[in-house]
Amino acid sequence: MQKYRVLPTLIVGLVGAIIGSFSMMLYASTHFAGVAGPNNTPPNAYAAPLVAGGDDQSRIVSAVKRVAPSVVALNVTVNGQQIVPTDPFMQFFGQQAPGRVERYRARASGSGFVYSRTGDGGLIVTNAHVVHPPNGSSVSSIQVVFQNGDRVPGHVFATNIGADLALVKVDNYTKVPPPVEIADSSKLEAGQWAIAIGEPFELKQSVSLGVVSGFNRDETIGSEGGGGEIAFKGLLQTSAPINPGNSGGPLIDVEGRLIGVNQSTANPQAGAQGIGFAIPANTVREQVAALESNPGTHQGTNTGFIGAALETVTPDLGVQLNYKGKGVAVAQVVSGGPADQAGMQPGDVIQKVNGQDVTTNDEVVKAIKDTKPGSTIEMEVWSAGIKKLVTIKVQERPADVGDALPQQQQGQDPDQQQQDPSQGQQGQGQDQP
């Protein structure tokens, strides 16, 4: 009987040897791949295959693994100026203190993702506000940090402030990961999974999970860097938390496809919790394609601006102005701005815009913003008891000023600038009218 057991034993041994060899090959491929490539960095990154079927958790994990190599951190060095009070005690007691202008250097952090590969490098998509600082500051350097640890110099290829999108180019780098696939955001449905990925302050990937919760949101997004507010239309709303530094990173679905670019989070001080906003994928596809075909372009906000702070006339304000009726009062006028050049003054009351009655500042602001820069807008104005027709040539609104009285912020840019300690403290600054 013993001799009949030899064949099964041989078969079991052969199968065991095959399995052992395969296991060693798999171990070697996953544990020693990092030693390849120049400077001991991993070789070119490839998108991980998606898991077919499976539960939601497996699909989410698979989608993150697929996109993660193509997400980058952007370290931006900003040079600017600040006004430092010469007598800080006057400012402490609420008095206007004289100041001196000092230069400062700050560091900002944002995220981005690979949009395309070029012959010797690639193009990275991010938010325009990540690489276009407010208040006239300038970017002196951009460092792109890839998942494998490589740090590659980048430069702004093209920007569109009005869409809050920008392209950053890296040159002489052949290990650019695969581009992120862009989905059709018009097919999104409320309640489907949304995954926000970013590289906040190089924390080696930050992933947050939520659902698509709204479409075509119009939000006014402010900057913590001291700049003003910009009104954005058609944003995608998500419950996926957008952490500080995640601006410019991808918002993806469970298939690992881009459904939006993370932009901002709702201001928690206004009572909003767990609300984030992203630029829809279809908008990204259209705007970034235009930037790619027009290198060096720097498009502005593409919204109208007259340089006046406005306030809806209330009964109390009407008494102060000695004005009876409805309308929108001019509270401030920017010196040298379009409204100033047209002769408008603080205390004037706008009654009609382009022949239409107006009763709230929102109506006037909307009419101004919807007017194409370079064209004119007509306003019927009450000025110290005299009615007059004012024609204003509308300019393009700068990215770092507002065009209405400061209001409660709807949204807030989650990116934070980090001050270089060797350069002193950076002033907070306030929104300008």
Image: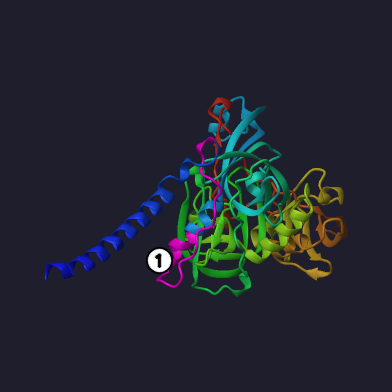
Q: In which quarter of the image is residue 404?
A: bottom right
State the residue position of label 1: 57
Q: Which residue lies furthest to the front in this view?
A: 3
Nearer to me, 111 or 245: 111
Residue 160 inside the magenta-drawn segment:
no
Tell me: 369 left or right of 392: left
Image position, residue 141 (x, y; %): 65, 36
Horizontal and vertical percent position of residue 26: 40, 54
Estimate the x, y position of residue 41 in percent, counting from the top left: 51, 40
Residue stretch in magenta = 39-64
**153 vs 331, nearest the viewer:** 153
Give how far across and how far down residue 75 sits, in percent.
Answer: 58, 40
Q: Can residue 122 be seen in this view?
A: yes
Residue most extreme to the left: 1
Identify the element where label 1 is drawn.
helix
Q: Work out whether residue 124 or residue 93 is closer to the camera in this orientation and state it.
A: 124
Q: Is residue 178 left or right of residue 363?
A: left
Q: How many marks?
A: 1
Residue 92 sits above or below residue 192 on the image: above
Q: Does the magenta stretch include residue 45?
A: yes
* Residue name at image x 82 percent, y 60 percent: 372
Q: In which quarter of the image is the N terminus?
A: bottom left
Can residue 98 be seen? no
Amino acid type at image mark 1: Gln
Q: Is residue 124 above or below residue 87?
A: below
Q: Tell which of 83 and 187 is nearer to you.
A: 187
**Residue at left 83%, top 62%?**
379
Tell me if 68 is positioned left or right of 4 in this view. Answer: right
